[in-house]
Amino acid sequence: MSELRYDPMKKAWVIIATERGVRPVNVQKREHLRSCASEAACPFCPGNENRTPPEILAIRDPGSRPNGPGWRIRVLPNKFPALTIESPLERYGEGIYDVVSGFGAHEVVVETPDNLEQMADFSVGHLQDVFGVYRSRLRDLMKDQRFRYIMIFKNHGTEAGASLFHSHSQIIALPVTPNLVAVELASTRDYFQLKERCMLCDIIHQELEDQARIVLVEEKFIVFTPFASSFPYELRVVPRRHSHDFSLVDDDTLAHLAFAIKEVLTLLRKELDDPPFNLILHTAPPFTHRAGKPYYWSSIESDFHWYLELVPRLTMIAGFEWGTGFQINPTSPEDAARFLRESEI
Ligand SMILES: [Zn+2]
Ligand SMILES: [Zn+2]
């Protein structure tokens, strides 16, 4: 049984998930990934549906049956979950320490039936469908009032944490608010209380004026390198119109998002030799009533602004970074943006 433990000195939650010790040993060197990934051995390949738990959602060809071939995108419970929906939600103390039972949801989005196709290869239409699946799962999970936050992310490449080559993303619904998320929610809320403006709307305005860190400007999205980028070529993909909750975006917005992501992934593949990366959705938490905190998210619609973070994993996290929590970034965000902006796809 996994559990969430709180480090009172670092003010950080961790998940102690011992079941995951038996994860599939499929961690290969990046250069060997393509040749090692075999369809017969891959639990995400069509024909191997019986090797995964029953699907939660799938986009399927008409007439195809659940848990058989004929799907284009498939969502499954993670076979090696960090948290499980079956665990009761319990909060308790162990002396000085705080613990929450391992209640949560851990799902896998298998993004394509093709064993070798990677996200950068997807058509814009297929990418839109993947984001549509994210939105559906988010809508569904947000109905469960026990979840404090729902994290959707993708690991591409072993250096970014992927343990299977077949292109997939993950969804983890948590019974606590992760501290990085809590900091972001609090800073944007405080900014709004002071100025009655959304911080990210102000950042968009300034970045468009400044231009130095802009990588792509599209009708509904901008892509830029953050002013204080922690990592080389770190990118933010942000809707230009204020919107706090990814579960509420419309299909047209998803189509524009798919176009922007396709452009950016194509750029990264060409200019940085298909780097490992993490793609992370930052969106508003489920709106829940919390006893004793009646105003907790009362301005969230106005103060938070959803976005995607795309972080190529080109540098290692070493002792200094580990000890201080801040990164030494050898590439300025202005140089990174100029390099990507001037690339001709
Ligand atoms: Zn596969
Ligand atoms: Zn905004």
Image (cartoon, rainbow, N blue to C red):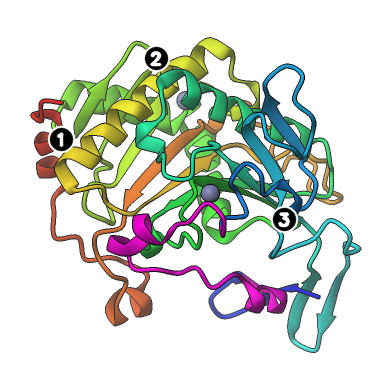
Mark in the foreground, 1 or 3: 3
Task: Name the residue carrying label 3.
Answer: 51
Question: Is 154 situated left or right of 238 in this image?
Answer: right
Please identify the quadrant where the C terminus is shown.
Answer: top left
Taking the spot 28% from the left edge, 56% from the top edge, the residue there is 230
Give above or below for 104 relative to 247.
Answer: below
Report if the CB atoms under discs 1 and 2 are less than 8 Å apart. no
> Where residue 302 sits in the image (x, y, percent)?
57, 25
Give above or below for 159 relative to 261.
Answer: below
Q: What amino acid type should be assigned to the residue bearing mark 3? A: Arg
Give above or below for 51 relative to 203.
Answer: below
- Magenta-colored stretch includes residue 25: yes
> Where residue 56 sits in the image (x, y, percent)?
77, 39
Front residue of 331 and 294:
331
Report if the CB atoms under discs 2 and 3 are less than 8 Å apart. no
- Magenta-colored stretch includes residue 173: no
> Where residue 98 sits in the image (x, y, percent)?
75, 77
> Earlier along the polypeptide chain: callout 1 or callout 2?
2
Q: What is the CA distance from the residue labelled 2 to the residue labelled 3?
A: 40 Å
Q: What is the CA distance from the residue labelled 1 to the residue labelled 3?
A: 41 Å
Quarter of the image where one finds residue 295:
top right
Taking the spot 32% from the left edge, 63% from the top edge, the residue there is 32
Taking the spot 81% from the left edge, 61% from the top edge, the residue there is 103
Helix, strand or loop at label 2? It is loop
Task: Name the residue carrying label 2.
Answer: 220
Q: What amino acid type should be assigned to the residue bearing mark 2? A: Lys
Mark in the foreground, 1 or 2: 1
> Earlier along the polypeptide chain: callout 1 or callout 3?
3
Q: Which portion, as a residue range, is magenta?
A: 14-41
Question: Is 344 situated left or right of 8 in this image?
Answer: left
